[in-house]
Amino acid sequence: MNANAKSERTRLSAEDWEEAALRLIAEQGVGAVAVEALARQLGVTKGSFYWHFRTREALVQASLERWELYGEREIISQIEAIPDPRVRLPELFRRVAHELQPHRVYAALLKALDHPQVTPVMARVSQRRMEFLNTAYREAGMPPAEALNRARLTYAAYVGFLQLNFTLGLPRITHEEFDAYVEHMIATLIPA
Amino acid sequence: MNANAKSERTRLSAEDWEEAALRLIAEQGVGAVAVEALARQLGVTKGSFYWHFRTREALVQASLERWELYGEREIISQIEAIPDPRVRLPELFRRVAHELQPHRVYAALLKALDHPQVTPVMARVSQRRMEFLNTAYREAGMPPAEALNRARLTYAAYVGFLQLNFTLGLPRITHEEFDAYVEHMIATLIPA
DNA sequence: CCTCAAACATACGCTCGAGTATGGATTTTG
DNA sequence: CAAAATCCATACTCGAGCGTATGTTTGAGG
């Protein structure tokens, strides 16, 4: 798709820095985004960075905005294409469960919720997703008041699972056990 | 119970430093534990600190061990005193929901799960709590395989709620709405 | 091929926080 | 009360990381 880590492209653009920063965020968190470290990883020096960005803060900001803008839509639009509302939620659960890769950034940002640049982004993204769940539950036939709470509960379970499994690696779970867990979630949280 | 923040005790002990560190962790996270900042808060200088601890890492370690050791037992022992297993879980949910203060440290540590000193502590604590939930569900009459998954789901919901509400402050929820949410959790996650 | 702006390198200054060295003050104890 | 142990202050070093200043390369258009 584009240049890899080391010395394929001769000149870099601001977008290259932003994507590299996002990779670093996904792997080591927001705090690990250091200018000189990124420069080494891209095969250049600070001199390059400070041409593209005014400050380190600006890079983080641009990366987060980029993530919020381009890193979402896919799954939601796929789910919205499913005609029967009652099939949507189980399908959503299963797909999210088997594509944990794109959630690496989200999991990393969860650990930086107090960061002033991260907070508003995560507030917007989480809010949107919960509202999506909310309408999905209502369209599946659940009364509004209950649907809202169920959406909150579902999303909390998602967030908690990310934390416990992704970062902590707990519980040590096999592939089959995981599938059983997902089905248990579906049976418990989605009305028949 | 003991000396407060500023200048009541003339001499300090290692425990004083550990408790001060835990307060700081609860309020600003593990990353905010800085030696000189803590010293100012306690009304002394670094010279004092490095008599009690060999390094900053040692303080963090001691604080975490202290938290793991003394900071738990209360709620669990209270719940275990309830005779009827079917009443335990709803009671647990309600008490946990209305005593969010002692969970500040846990919520802060969730944001530092990648920290090498935090990881093992959180793994142990979370594992213990999930096993407690597991047996509670089994004693309430749930089949073992289902009970384990339900325990995972419940604890994930707890963790996720901490993150979304505590740190992010989302969703903006009133006291009454919160109670309704807790009852919804009980109705959804606990078998009749 | 020449030029000029974009893209990068090099070398610096600055701040912040951890850790050390050493001496002074304050208890505790024989 | 003297001495020894405990507790703390002051004054440093040192490395990491951000940002700046200024010179150097590269490549696309005239």
Image (cartoon, coloured by chain):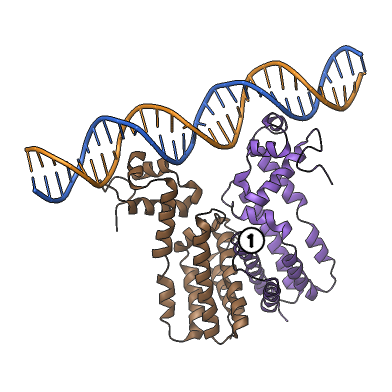
Chain colours: A brown, B purple, C orange, D blue
- Chain letter, disc 1 residue: B
Q: Is residue B19 left or right of residue A148?
A: right
Q: Is residue B28 left or right of residue A60?
A: right
The residue at 75%/63% (across/down) is B99
Quadrant in which the N terminus of chain A is drawn: bottom left
Residue holding disc 1: B166
The kind of residue tagged 1 is Phe
Res. A82 in view: yes
Displayed quadrant of residue B38: top right
Q: Is residue A33 left or right of residue B15?
A: left
Residue A48 percent coordinates (x, y): 32, 42
Which class describes the residues within 10 Å of circle 1: few (<14), some (14-19), or many (20+)?
some
Q: How many marks?
A: 1
Mark 1 lies on a secondary structure that is helix
Whether A134 is drawn above or below B133: the answer is below
**C25 or A67, which lies in front?**
C25
Whether A20 is drawn above or below B51: the answer is below
The residue at 67%/59% (across/down) is B127
**B130 or A178, which lies in front?**
B130
